Amino acid sequence: PEYINEGVKEALVNGKSTIDKLKSQLNESIKENIKINQDLKTAQASLILEQKTHNLPQRKRDYVARLLGNKDAEYIAENFNYVVEMFEKDELESADIAIDRANAAAITRDICRA
């Protein structure tokens, strides 16, 4: 009975040691897998952003990159056109404001001459 108990104890200790070692390896593999997946998602997002913006003017490209640069690939794909439209709308509004200011300055200048 003592020999059997010692044999069982030794088997349990060896089994636990093996399980702990494998559990540690599994945890390391999971951490590595998570990091690789994060790196992959980042690379995919950068790639899709580059593909969609490569032919845009620099200002528009910078605007899109600023708004979408830290998003995932799926979000970029879904919202790219919307962000470009926002940029174009902002540009039109800026142009309209500049025109209004120029017109106001011209009117003021004409009034001051008269």
Image: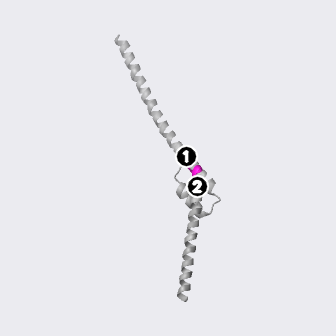
Neighbour tally class for label 2: few under 14, some 14-19, many 20 plus, Cα within 10 Å: few
Q: Is residue 72 above or below residue 60?
A: above
What span is colored magenta in the figure? Answer: 72-83
Q: CA distance from mark 1 to mark 2?
A: 22 Å
65 in the magenta segment: no
Q: Earlier in the sequence, mark 1 or mark 2?
A: 1
Q: Residue at x 56, y 59 (%)?
A: 86
Q: Residue at x 44, y 33 (%)?
A: 24
Magenta portion: prevailing SS class: helix
The answer to which quarter of the image holds residue 3 is: top left
Labels 1, 2: front one: 2
Residue underneath mark 2 = 82
Q: Which mark is residue 8?
A: none
Neighbour tally class for label 1: few under 14, some 14-19, many 20 plus, Cα within 10 Å: some
Q: Among all residues in the image, which is located at the extreme left?
A: 2
Q: Position of residue 47 (x, y in %)?
A: 60, 51
Q: Is residue 54 above or below residue 23?
A: below
Nearer to us in this view, 1 or 56: 56
**Quarter the N terminus occupies:** top left
Q: Among all residues in the image, which is located at the extreme top?
A: 1
Whether pointer 1 and pointer 2 mark residues with C-beta atoms closer than 8 Å, the reply is no
79 in the magenta segment: yes
Looking at the rendered structure, the number of numbered marks drawn on it comes to 2
Q: Residue at x 54, y 84 (%)?
A: 109
Q: Position of residue 64 (x, y in %)?
A: 56, 58
Snapshot colouring: one colour
Residue underneath mark 1 = 41
Q: Position of residue 19 (x, y in %)?
A: 44, 27
Q: Position of residue 34 (x, y in %)?
A: 50, 41
Q: Which amino acid type is marked by label 2?
A: Tyr
Q: Which amino acid type is marked by label 1?
A: Lys
Q: Is residue 19 above or below residue 113?
A: above
